[in-house]
Image (tube, coloured by chain):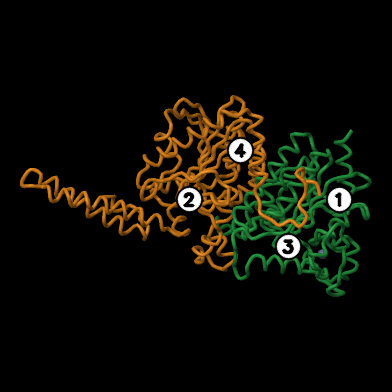
Amino acid sequence: MPPASEYRLPFEAPIYEMEARLAEMETQYAKNRAGGDPTRLAEQIRHLRRELAALKREVFSQLDPWQIVQVSRHQNRPQTRDYLPLLFDEFIELHGDRALGDDKAIVSGLARLDDLKVMFIGHQKGKNLAERTACNFGSAHPEGYRKALVKMRLAAKFGLPIITFIDTPGAYPGVTAEERGQAAIIAENLMEMSQIRTPIVCVVIGEGGSGGALGIGIGDRLAMLEFTYYSVISPEGCASILWKGSEHAPKAAAALRMTSRDLLAFGIIDDVITEPLGGAHKDHRASAQGLRSYLIQAIRQLKTATLDELMNLRYAKYRKIGVFLEENPVSANGRP
Amino acid sequence: MASRESRSPRSWHGHFEPKRVPVGVWMQCEGCRATLFRKQVEENLSVCPECNHHFSLGALDRIAQLLDADTFEEWHADLQAKDPLGFQDRLPYPERVRQEQDRTGLAEAAVVGQGYIKGIRMVLGVTDSNFIMGSMGSVVGEKLTRAIERATEEKLPLVIVSGSGGGARMHEGIFSLMQMAKVSTALGRFHAAGGLYLSVLTHPTMGGVAASFASLGDFIIAEPRALIGFAGPRVIEQTVRVQLPSGFQTSEFLLEHGFIDRIVHRRDLRSTIAQLIDYTTG
Ligand SMILES: [Zn+2]
């Protein structure tokens, strides 16, 4: 049974209730094994386990967009630093942006993934109050985005593929962030990432919050874990602007079409990575396993292309994004 | 706000003819509160003769002020927004777009094409903060990207005048966000090919526009006292709960912090652009 302090979402209640019942039966089974015949109880336990799996499947296959947002922000959801030891055979952290500081909201370093050597960059939100405060809840400052850029340039110089993990409610909105050029550094990252001559794989592991997500999100492969979102604006922000109140966030979450399934259908992302039954927070190890096989396969595949091919494909990938009407379509070279 | 008579976007093809219907003979300056003779303000490039406050300029007026007379050739004027999300707030998105078209006389928030400044041929893009806050939907992203690609191909100088209240076109969701990536990717190629890009920031240049093409110029110049930044002042106030310093996120603030090259009065924009281009071409 999870500790009493464990954070639960309202729609997870029946799952936790059934898990508690199962745990009780398992305890009883262990006690009884010494004495009489436990076969009847064992049969009941097997039955309940099947029921529990079915319940998780049912609850999580029917989540609405706002519930998915809540899962993506779940307090027990694995974050970048949880994944590092589960994912990589080695991780050598590299700090600092060589200009202003070391933003804790961005983690970067060299990593070994099977036989691959890579540069890793990811948002970190923080697990407890102290860490959350140090990380600004995953909202990076300009020095965080510059830290990412400095490490990516290093990777490109030595031919290391880049992996980025996106998990941010958005880039930090604050006085110091503005003074240090939040807009300018995000813009620079977008442009440089589009030109960096090494494979880049980006995965949304939690929240994909607008420009702050995109700031480390330009690559050759873009994937999302199943219960995550990626959006131009937070549902709360959208609701308060368009519906004049953040209590309309569930409506905005649906209207923005921001779940992994939506983005796959729109052709914006390449893949959705399945999460363990009941969400990544129920089994960090299994979630890491899914990520690991995805990353290995994606990088191996990208490495078969020449760098020139890779750059042309990356250009085409972003060039084609957009939906509009055109009365007199232009020729292929874009001339009027 | 709409000082132009409304026109059907259907008639919006080829070149433009700026038309204006005066709203009133007198107007009040947002800067110094002085009551001003509207005609006098307009003749002064929409700058207050008393305090130099730069009034917001629509895309068509901007083009007319900036370029040599009758040299603008508009491109891709027939691009129109679609509704990929089936988005509806108080209005369905297509209806909102139609209303904005009628209100502003523009087909979308960006106008692109080519023209001349003091005889120098260039590619010009202008985003108009009057049209759904100058937000970057697919049409804005596509028009700018095509303009950048054409400038790359023909080795022409590129000038983009930015004006956007927030950058994000919420009604187009992730497609709006990804236009930042698309335009920045095109600018990456443009710069790699050695192109000259001059970015002009006007009031206001915020959010996704500031965090993409507006900040990627070889030269970045701004009109005086424009609001420029990533997060809106109200969002920042709510997040950090402090009183924002006076002059926060103005052109002068950005100059002070090292993010723009020069602040240029509207009357000097043409000559400054021509001068800067001259230094970079032979
Ligand atoms: Zn005035």
What SS does tag 4 mark? helix
What SS does tag 2 mark? loop
- From the image, tell me which residue sits under label 3: B131
Quarter of the image where one finds residue B274: top right
Image spot of residue A285 (x, y percent): 36, 39
Q: Earlier in the sequence, mark 4 or mark 2?
A: 4
Q: Is mark 2 within 8 Å of ligand 1?
A: no
- From the image, tell me which residue sits under label 4: A146
- Tell if the residue under mark 4 belongs to the same chain as the one under mark 1: no
Quarter of the image where one finds residue A292: top left
Residue A198's label in the rendered image is none
For badge 2, the amino acid type reads: Thr
Image spot of residue A249 (x, y percent): 51, 63
Query: Marks 3 and 4: in contact by CB < 8 Å?
Result: no
- From the image, tell me which residue sits under label 1: B269
Q: Which chain is green?
A: B
Which is more foreground, mark 4 or mark 3? 3
CA–CA distance in space, label 4 to label 3:
33 Å
